[in-house]
Structures are given as structure tokens and as C-alpha cells.
Image: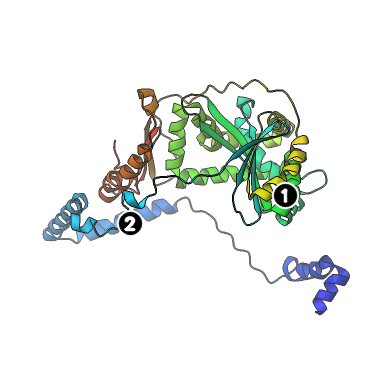
Amino acid sequence: MVLKARIAEEGSKAVFSPLIEKFILNNPHCVTIEMQPDPEKASRDEAAEKENLDKVKASMTEEDLAELARATRELKLKQETPDPPEALRCVPSLSLYDIPKEPIRIPTEVGDINGVKVLQHDLFTNDVLYTEVVFDMSSLKQELLPLVPLFCQSLLEMGTKDLTFVQLNQLIGRKTGGISVYPFTSSIQGTEDPCSHIIVRGKSMAGRADDLFNLMNRVLQEVQFTDQQRFRQFVSQSKARMENRLRGGGHGIAAARMDAKLNVAGWISEQMSGVSYLEFLQALEEKVDNDWEGISSSLEEIRKSLLSREGCLVNMTADGKNLSNTEKFVSKFLDLLPSKPLVERASWNAQLPLNNEAIVIPTQVNYVGKAANLYDKGYQLSGSAYVISKHISNTWLWDRVRVSGGAYGGFVTLILIQVYSPSYPTGTLTY
């Protein structure tokens, strides 16, 4: 009670700031530990393992070697022999009769607020409002595409004229369940044109809908792209994440790279999340120091290109009463957006060269992929494609690549057909 009274009288900063300064900032009883990478460790470990294996082999008799060869053949035969029916029957499974034939139907009402299409889904959400505001990205210049992920991050992690980024995020945390901004790109069935948007997603209690849309507007229109040091951190962090992803998730990078060779939507995604994006970040890290004004202007240009009521779409999910009560806040939000005529689509007719390539990275794992565009051969999409791809991934590929081949695994996706696998350094996987 005494502490509570002090906080009420003096304020939390007056009470806790001296304690933080005394026990944390100026506390001499601390230990600093630095961990330095050893670039030679992997080669030393490999040499030690080889030496140990050579010693073991040298100590083996002819009979030991023959027994080892026999055990290896026996293991390989066991791996390649299909499981007997009685063993397969022990595995839990679903029959077709266990799977509902009818998909779940989401109620959707298509409406209009201030000339903007609005989708409303009347569902029980326990008084939570979920919403997405979608902006058309098709008018964006091609050279600005790799900057879009950093633009999205900057909207949420840079401050406004009146709020630091910390204060802005604290306000979002107090008033809402969170706001996110991210790009979305996909192919359109039956055409080569891409579908590309920036999506602003948020959620709050229905009673906080006014705060939610107000904060969305502040994030989109009031955030200032002026903090050079902060943006430099974004670039360095993004580059480090991409490098880690390249080493630990190279099969995803390979899939994106193949997609970029086969369609425009894949190329756009690769510019914002693949090897091309990593190369962009590496160059941008130097450019931040040499041409910050140019980068800041490019971020503003992206915002100016995206923010418009034209081509905008609002999506909301809540119960009917809360949806009706929220419409006035949506109207206010849309009124604050710039109104400008539709801009001609930018020319994004680009793909990576359709050739084989190898990307050398410092890892002991090889990631291998192969792809083909089935649509070019006249394939028509059917739901069975998803069943087929799952079946191949979980049966033949699993048995051949992981069980028999010794690799980590293999996967198939069938829209474009993509086959890719992380394998051991021996590179045993072949096509």
C-alpha cells in the first residue's frame, strides 16, 4: 500500500527511475560475456571425425568389414521394402466418408461505403472486430518493389510528428489487439497478370473500432520517414534474417526462385523475399549512408502511389450489430484517404531467365529444386491436384528421399509443379 501511495503521489517515473539507475544502469556487479565465431571450427570437427573413423576402420578385421557391408545391405533392403498390409492397417487413417463433402460457407455481404467496396462477414467473434484494408499495388514503379517490405515495417516502427515509434506502438497495444502491414502477391487464374496488394490488418474489441480505424489512418498517413538510424537497423536486421533463411530454409528460397522464372507474380514475390531481395538489401545497406534523402523520398513515393480510395477494399468480420455500428468509423477512415483517379498499371512484365542455376552458400546442406509450369501444357486446375501432391510428398518422395536416400525430406506442390528437397552434403538426391 505504501508503494501504491508513493506512485499515486510522485508518479511511476519518480519511484522506479532511481531504482533502475541504481540496480541496473550503475550496478558494478555485472559480467559481460562475448561469444566470437570460429570460422575454422567446422573444418576441425570434420577432420577429427574423419580421423576417428579411419582409426575405427583400421582396427576392424576382414570379418568385421564383411559384417558391416552385410548390415548395410540389410538396412537398405529394409528401407526399400514396402510395409506389409497388416502393418499399414495399424496406422490411423480417415476414409472418404469421414470427410464432409460440403465446404464451410462463410457468410459474405458485399456493400459500398463512400464508393469503396466493403465485404462484411456476420459471424460470432465474442465482440472482437477483425478488419483488413487492402490497397492496390499495381501502379507502383518496378524499381520500388524491393523497398515495399521495409516500407511496411517503417509504417509501424517509425514515429509520427507527435509520437515516437515506442509511443505509437504502446498506443496501438492499449487500444487494439494489434495492427500489421504486409504485401500480398498472387497469380490470377486464367491470366498471366499478377494480383498485388498492400494489406493493413487489425483487430480490436468492437467498442474500440473508432480507435482501430483512427490508428490505422495515423500509421498510413502520419508516420514520418525521417529516422535514418532506425531505418538502417531495419535494413541490417532484414539482411541478417534473409541470410539465416538462406542457410536454414533454402528449399523455400529455391521454390521462390523457380516461381520467379515461371510467372510474373512469382517474380514480384522474389523481389521482396528471395535472393534478389537479399542482393537489394546488401546494396541498400551502403546506400542508407550515402543517399538517405533518396531513400526517404522513395518511401514517400510508395505511400503516395498506394494510398487512394480508388482500388481500395475493406473487409470486416464481426457479428451483425457490431458490423453496423462500425460502418460510420469506416466512412470516416475512407474520407481521410486521398481521392485520385486510377493510375495506369505499371509495367511488371518481368521474369528471371529460364535456366538452371546454382547458388553457393556457406552451409553443409544442399537444397535442390526442380519446377515446370503445367498450365503451359494445357493443364486445368482440379482439386485432386492438392491430394496428389500430398500423396506424393508423404509416400514415394518420403520413402525415396528420406528413408532410402538419407536426405532431410522432399516436397511437391502441384499448381506449378515444384519438387524440392533439403539433402545432406553428399547430394544423393537426383531427378
Depth check: 1 or 66 in front? Answer: 1
Residue designated by label 1: 209
Place of residue 243 in the rendered image (x, y in percent of width and height, measured from the top left): 52, 43
Residue type, numbered disc 1: Ala
Spatial separation of the CA atoms under disc 1 and disc 2: 62 Å
1 vs 2, front mark: 1
Q: Judge whether 26 appears above or below 269 on screen.
A: below
Residue type, numbered disc 2: Glu
Residue designated by label 2: 49
Q: Residue at x 72, y 39 (%)?
A: 220
Quadrant in the picture for residue 2: bottom right
Depth check: 149 or 89 in front? Answer: 89
Depth check: 399 or 75 in front? Answer: 399
Q: Secondary structure at mark 1?
A: helix
Which numbered tag is attached to residue 145?
none
Place of residue 245 in the rendered image (x, y in percent of width and height, measured from the top left): 50, 45
